Structure formats: structure tokens, C-alpha cells
Image (cartoon, rainbow, N blue to C red):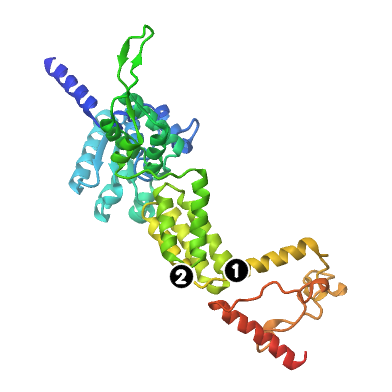
Amino acid sequence: MAEDLFAAAAEDRLVRQAPLAARLRPYSLDDVVGQEHLLGKGKPLRALIEADRLSSVIFWGPPGTGKTSVAQLVARTTSKAFEQLSAVTATVKDVREVAARAQDRLGQRGQGTILFLDEVHRFNKAQQDALLPSVESGLLVLIGATTENPFFEVNPPLLSRSTLFRLEPLSVEACTQLAHRGLEAEKATIDAEALTLLVDRAGGDGRHVLTSLEVAVALAHEHPDAAHDETGAIVDELIRVTVADVEAALGTKALRYGRDDHYDVISAFIKSIRGSDPDAGLYWLARMLEAGEDARYIARRLVVLASEDIGMADSFSLVVADAAARAVEFVGLPEAQLNLAHAVVHLATAPKSNRVTVALGRAQSDVRERAGGEVPNHLRDGHYKGAKSLGHGQGYDYPHDSPEGWVDQQYRPSELEGRVYYDPSPHGHEDEVRKRMQDNRRNHNEDGT
């Protein structure tokens, strides 16, 4: 009895001394912050957990999104035995021992076993293969957690026998809610600017929010205004966390980046790249990333710039910008900042032309301000029955039948024939396009056709 009391006291002391992130782990599904698409009322993962019918699953998501917390909630609610291993330290022997204990439980008590395997991507192929028979037979229900793409890191046979649930980075609102819980637990308050800095730097990582907050609270001075009860007596001394405390905890300085700064900095960013200054482009990129600007927004602006300010002078720029945008979605920050920097340097050093932008504007102006005109008969669809009797398609010259691969014929309504929209510049690849178009016109004039 005394040993039980000592054990309980020791456990209570460990809980009180545990890091803030550990102390605030959710005790019910309603306590989980974020992941509403999986754990909201009536959502699939929540339904499986509440019914204790969870089969093997893989939780895939960035750090601090709740993978371990959800697994531990399963441990609290399931009637099955719950075993936990870390793929960082576990061996094939450990897996076999878990399987042997699961076999004994099933045979003696009819009780199933759940195995939570953290960092499952750290298991090599042989280790995953050792796990496969127990998962395949249902002896073990696997909960695997990984920050890496499981389609690359988890053996296909194991992945095919598991349901994949993707956990998303926590939203700003979710991180803010988590920070307020931490402040309540630490009996602290925080300045609005400090809270914004803390949440922005978290990058959707809830553990990062709480760990940084705990350090900031430790660094903070006592709030000069003490809390009072109804009689006016001082009941507690609240700690106030300031921007300086959060800066010290994060090891970074806060940048002023309000609504005006957002538009001014992105404007400077675009104009620097348009002006072919890669160093300035990189500076503004770094400033936006440091201030917590949405990397997807930056990527979208680069994709637009690739056609708006470079266009046909270097068509590959659009490919580079698009690849950077895809990398932001696929890789995520912080690694994807390298892809963004790659795109910035390429776009800034590429030859520039806005002729595609100008051409589209001219065409749109004619569409809006001039009579539309009819589609010339030789360009109309001649494939359906009766089209030829209407003259559709008659007189059309097929360009591939010409040795030059080009024929001179009318492609617009008569009212707009001769209007020039696209006028290639002499810059980069567009100069080759300009010369090719000039050669076509010259050959047409020399032929007198």
C-alpha cells in the first residue's frame, strides 16, 4: 500500500515537472486542437476511435500536429492492450516480443493489441517486413506516425493494409487557442504583439508554440498589476510575456509586418525581380519568410510574374516558377524556401519581356470595344452532318501540308483582320520568335500570295 502511495506521488510530481507540451496533452477528443477534418463531430477518425473499431492506420503530418496525442487518446479509450515503440530505437527483436505478448493476450484473454510505432519511416525494409505478418493477420493493430511521405518511406504491403490519415499544420486560430491554454496553465498573460510573433513563428507546429511559450514565461518579469479577488486582496502575481521575451525564446527578432507592409514588401519584391536584381529579390524574399508571410502566396506571385514580366523571352521561367509553387505544397517550409530562392534568382536573371501581357490587353480591348464579327467559314467546324452544305471548313489550308509548316490565311473575323496584338521583343528567346514571324511574312510577300 505504501509503495502504491509513493508511486502515485512520484507520478504526480513527474506530471507537474513535465514540459508544458506534455502537461497539456489532450485527455479527450474534444480537447484536441485542430484536425477538425478528422476529429470533428461525425468525422471518420473520431467515429472509429469512439467505436473502438480502429484498424491499422498511418498518421502522416508535420511535427507538432497531434499524431502522438491522438495515439495516446486511442490508448485511453480502447479495450485493447496498447504497446508503444519508437522506430528510432526499436529493433526487429522488439517487434517480435510485442507480437509474442499480443499472441499470449489473445489466447489467454481474447484481448487484441494496438502497437503505436512512432517515426515509422525510420524502420528499414527488413524491420517493416518483420512487422507485416502480425499486421496482415490482425494480431497487431498498427498505429504508425510519420513526418515523411509514407508513399516513399513505408513498404507498399504495409501501407496497403493501413488507412492513411493526413494531419494538417495547425491554423493560426488553433495555435492561438493552444497558446491561451498554455498561458492559463502557466498563470501568465501575453501582449498582443508577442502572441502574434509566437504564433507566426510556429509554422503550424503546436509543440513549438507551447515549448517557446514555456521558455518565454520563464524569461518574463512579473506583471506589475497583481490579480485581486472580490475583496481587493492580492491573490496571485501574473506573469506578463512581452515581445522581448518571445524574441529571446525564439532566438529571433520581431519584424514589423502589418497590412501595409504586406503590400509594400510584395510590391518591392516583384519590382526587384522585374528589374533583374537577384540580390534585392532574395532580400525581400528573406524578409517575407522571416515575417511569416504565406509561402504559397509568394509562390503564386512568382508564377504570375513569370508570364507577366518575362513571358516568351524565357518560357522556361514559367516552368521554374510552377515547380517552386509545387515544391511549397509538396516539401513545405523550411526546406521549400530554397526552391523559392532558386526561382527568384532564375526569374531575376532571365531576359524580360511584357509583350505577352500587352498582347492580351490589346486583344481584350478589341473584344470589349469592337464588333465581334463572325467566325470565318473556312475555320468553322466541318465534322458534323450537314456542315459541308453550309460551307463550313471549305477553303481551309492545313498548315502541316506546307513545307514551311505555315500558311497565310485569315484566322480572325474580317472586322479585326490586320490588327496586331503580339509584337515580339528583341530580348532572349523572344528574339527568335520575332525573326521567325518576320520570315513568315517575308516569304508570304515574296511569293505574292
Callout 2: 10 Å neighbours few (<14), some, many (20+)? some
What residue does disc 2 label? 349
Local SS, label 1 = loop
Q: Quadrant of residue 115?
A: top left
Q: Nearer the viewer, residue 187 or 243?
A: 243
Horizontal side of residue 321 vs 250, given as left or right = right
**Residue sitting farthest toward the left:** 2
Horizontal side of residue 412 vs 301, given as left or right = right
- Note whether residue 79 is visible: no
Name the kind of residue labelled 1 in the image: Asn
Local SS, label 2 = helix
Callout 1: 10 Å neighbours few (<14), some, many (20+)? some
Mark closer to the chain start, 1 or 2:
2
Residue in view at x 79 percent, y 62 percent: 369
Horizontal side of residue 36 vs 395, given as left or right = left
- Check the picture and name the quadrant holding the C terminus: bottom right
Residue in view at x 25 percent, y 32 percent: 105
Residue 244, image x and y in percent?
Answer: 32, 37
Residue 345, image x and y in percent?
Answer: 43, 66
Q: Quadrant of residue 286?
A: bottom left
Q: Nearer the viewer, residue 73 or 272?
A: 272
- Check the picture and name the quadrant holding the N terminus: top left
What residue does disc 1 label? 354
Say above or below: 56 vs 372: above
